[in-house]
Image: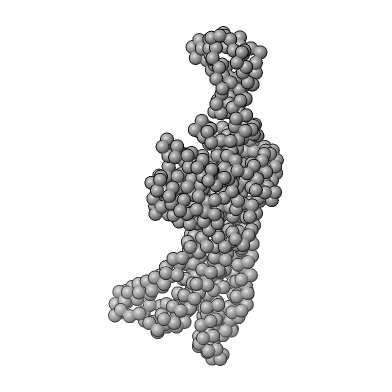
Amino acid sequence: MSIKSIISCCKYQLYKMRFIPLVLVVYVFGAMILTAITISVIDKVPFSFANANAGIIDLLMGGIIFAFMCFFLMTDYLNTAAANGASRTTACISAYISSIICSLVSAIEVSVLIPIISLITGYGETWGASLYGYIGALQDAGWDMLSIRLRFFGICLVYYIALSTMAMLLVSIVYRFPKWVSAIIIITIIFIPTAGIYMTLGEEAFASFWYSIAKLLGLKIEHEWLIGNALQGAAVCIGLSLVLLLLSCLITRHSSVKPLAIKSD
Amino acid sequence: MSVIEVKNVTKIYGKTVALHDVSLTFKENCIYGLLGRNGAGKSTMLNIISGRAFADSGEVLIDGVSAKGNDSALGKVHMMGEQLLYNPALKVKEMFKTASWFYPDFDMDYALNLCDEYKLEPKKKLAKLSTGYRTIAKAVNALACGAPIVFFDEPVLGLDANHRDMFYKQLIKRYNERPATYVISTHLIEEAAGLIERAVVIKEGQLLLDKEADEVRSMGYSVSGKAEDVDSFAKDKELMGEDVLGGLKTAYIKGSLEAAELPEGLSAEPMNLQNIFIHLTNS
């Protein structure tokens, strides 16, 4: 691993990700307009941006970043590095750095877009960030608007980083192992915390498991805390992303290079 | 200095031993021909040296430093493999640009000039190129990268005769302008024979030969004539192989021929690299 190679890898990865900010803006406004049109058609009410519920934007943006990272890393993760004399560890670390930069840009973007959208729709809350406290509750607790926006930005940033690194781990598993092994691992990862616990240990254990997760992430839990612990959530997300990075590095450490199939071949 | 030392490298895929305890050295500024039949282990060796695959045992040193996971060592090597590792959605020029971020001596002007010569469109996506032009794009990238060690694994795959000729000429020209260690792994031995300074032959995962090309050429000669005359001449000599066509026979004999010893009715010729390779790897 060398700084020079990490910089080269990051340059390439960021070059490939350069359209993300534009895609996100188009997506946010496109989704808003489409939602407003759909609601006006279905409910037979006059078109109004107030009908576009933009509260889900921060969550959906996380989903888009996750999906994009999966797609991007699937095509450009280790192969370009290997084609140019960079090691697997370098590729992993630079993908992590690039995902932080991408998350940073996305979090800035969503932090700027939300106030603009709230001006258009008249609705300023977002579902994701409200899990750490509604704007009203924070204002009641003495937070000024700038601090609330910065807090929102921070929450988005760490969640986007964690989601990007999850994508990195999934791609590492798919890259390293045969398809059937990857499928078993990924299904197990998804199954255990969802239906797995519910079916084997029962509803109470399932609820208690997710309650513990919410507590660990410092989320505001309805009727219990008005304001969540965002710092704790940030620490958990960063810690989680570092663990996922380490796992990705270990998984791909001895992985042979697998070229992509070209459709015309 | 850019020297590669392969030390006791073994690689096994399932039940197949791709490389068995192979040790050899690639010295700097030399054009190597890495020869072997299909499945001999040539690509495996190049993949291991360039960090694309990992040896089960043994090690690879580049300038005395282990290449395993070492960017500064691996950064001295560029491999033009049979398969495309770049994202096929990249344009040719984007591939060059990417390579230039990793190889500081990448010569973009040279690469674009070569594109002109080959009529390769730099704005075309790699996925949209024909197999031949994709090979050309990879070859141009490898020639322009400026790495001190460049591997060409089947560099003329899918190229027509004109493009193959252009590639060989370009390679020699580039080598003269900017000496580097070039390792060419190819099945078109006769075509590349003029370039090769040193030949490395691998057979069934083991190193069979590592010699200067001229030395290899002088390893044997062929004698042709009537079958009985050839048999009588060759009976006390070490045979590498023989071809029979009707009543005529050609014997491939190890060693060098003294002009005086050839009986009348027989003709002798020095063996070319391809013939020697065929008979070495057939035996």
Colour scheme employed for the rendering of this structure: one colour
In this rendered view, identify the residue nearer to me: B146 or A94.
Answer: B146
Q: Is A134 located above or below residue A42 in the figure?
A: below
Quadrant of the image occupied by residue A235? bottom right
Quadrant of the image occupied by residue A167? bottom right
Q: Residue at x 45, y 45 (%)?
A: B136
Q: Is A96 located above or below residue B1 in the figure?
A: below
Picture quarter with the N terminus of chain A: bottom right
Q: Is B191 located above or below residue B136 in the figure?
A: above
In this rendered view, identify the residue nearer to me: A62 or B76.
Answer: B76
Question: Is residue B282 at least partly visible in the picture?
Answer: no
Question: Residue A108, percent across and down?
Answer: 49, 76
Judged left or right of residue B60, residue B86 is: left
In this rendered view, identify the residue nearer to me: B254 or A78.
Answer: B254
Question: Is residue A8 at least partly visible in the picture?
Answer: yes
Q: Residue at x 47, y 82 (%)?
A: A125
Q: Residue at x 41, y 52 (%)?
A: B122
Question: Residue B282, percent across and down?
Answer: 59, 25
Question: Residue A38, percent across and down?
Answer: 33, 73
Q: Is A264 located above or below residue B268 in the figure?
A: below
Judged left or right of residue A97, residue A125 is: left
Count of numbered tags:
0
Question: Residue A37, percent across and down?
Answer: 32, 74
Q: Residue at x 47, y 61 (%)?
A: A16
Picture quarter with the C terminus of chain A: top left
